[in-house]
Amino acid sequence: YNTEQYLPACIESVLSQTFRDLELILVNDGSPDGSAAICDAAARADARVRVIHKLNGGPATAANAGLDAARGRYIGFVDSDDVIEPAMYETLYKAVRQSGCAMAACGSSVIDEDGRTLPGGVTSTLEGRQDALDLFYDVFQNGSMYGMLSWNKLFDAGLFAHIRYDESLLFGDDCSILHLIYNGQSVYCLNDRLYRYRYRAGSITSRLFHIRQ
């Protein structure tokens, strides 16, 4: 939503993946800026891109719209102001295929509004094949958000067969479903920093929490 300044770089980082057999679904959540035109131009330039234009409803509604439209065997999420490393999805795909897990996860770095790397990021003390629910223990024991995020993972699409994000949440919607996704599943944990999370002053996650009415 309203990320026209960063959206081209985000789109390019996905379409430039070393794993080429992918579908990029761009969900324009009613942005009044130039995001809609950028999405449509991307779809004209690359047949792998599909665009959904919808009324503004928040990130959970956008994620659900993408899930409803997705046709692939695996699902990944990328926020429109972030970028991903070229080998991210190839690395995670190989991890799920070789391990037999239903999902794989990676670490992240943090960048500023100009793309410069900042201190911090997301990593985990867990490595290799793990019981997915143990990711929650990692949060409580070590303070890592590695297990509480959707965007640092590749999921078997079947995990979302009867599950959708809670649309009453303005942010933190990952936490509304991950305990259901993880239940009875294994995850392959990597700490390679393959996702680049952009910290922006004024973004949803940098503002004080408030209850959505």
Image (cartoon, rainbow, N blue to C red):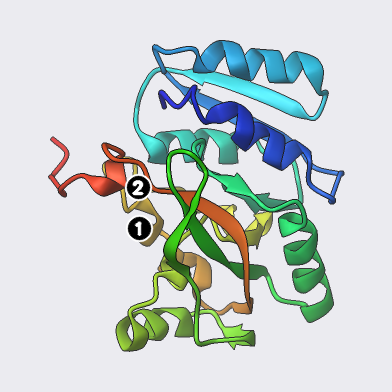
Q: Is residue 193 left or right of residue 16?
A: left
Three-letter amino acid code of the residue under disc 1: Ser
Q: Secondary structure at mark 1?
A: helix
- Picture quarter with the N terminus: top left
Residue at the location (60% across, 61% down)?
Answer: 153
Cβ–Cβ under 8 Å for marks 1 and 2: yes
In the image, is residue 49 above or below residue 200?
Answer: above
| 62 or 161, nearer to the observer | 62
Q: Could you say which disc has been placed on residue 176 in the image? A: 1
How busy is the neighbourhood of tag 1: few (under 14 within 10 Å), some, or many (20 plus)? some
Number of other residues with Cα within 10 Å of mark 2, as a class: few under 14, some 14 to 19, many 20 or more? some
Find residue 116 and report its horizontal and vertical position in percent: 50, 48
| Disc 1 from disc 2: Cα separation | 6 Å
- Disc 2 secondary structure class: loop
Instruction: Indicate left or right for 2 with 79 as reference.
Output: left
Q: Nearer the viewer, residue 63 or 160?
A: 63
Q: Residue at x 75, y 70 (%)?
A: 96
Query: Which one is earlier in the sequence, the residue at label 1 or at label 2?
Result: 2
Q: Which label sits on residue 166? A: 2
Mark yes or no: residue 211 visible. yes
> What amino acid is labelled 2 in the image?
Asp
Place of residue 40 in the rendered image (x, y in percent of width and height, measured from the top left): 65, 14
Residue 6, image x, y percentages:
52, 31
**Relative to 46, is 20 above or below?**
below
- Name the residue nearer the viewer: 212 or 200: 200
Q: Is residue 73 above or below residue 135?
A: above
In the rendered image, which quarter is residue 140 located in? bottom left
Q: Locate residue 102: give its quadrant.
A: bottom right
Q: Is residue 167 left or right of residue 105?
A: left
Q: Write down the quadrant of residue 51 in the picture.
A: top right
Numbered circle sitting on residue 124: none
Residue 170 seen in the current view: no
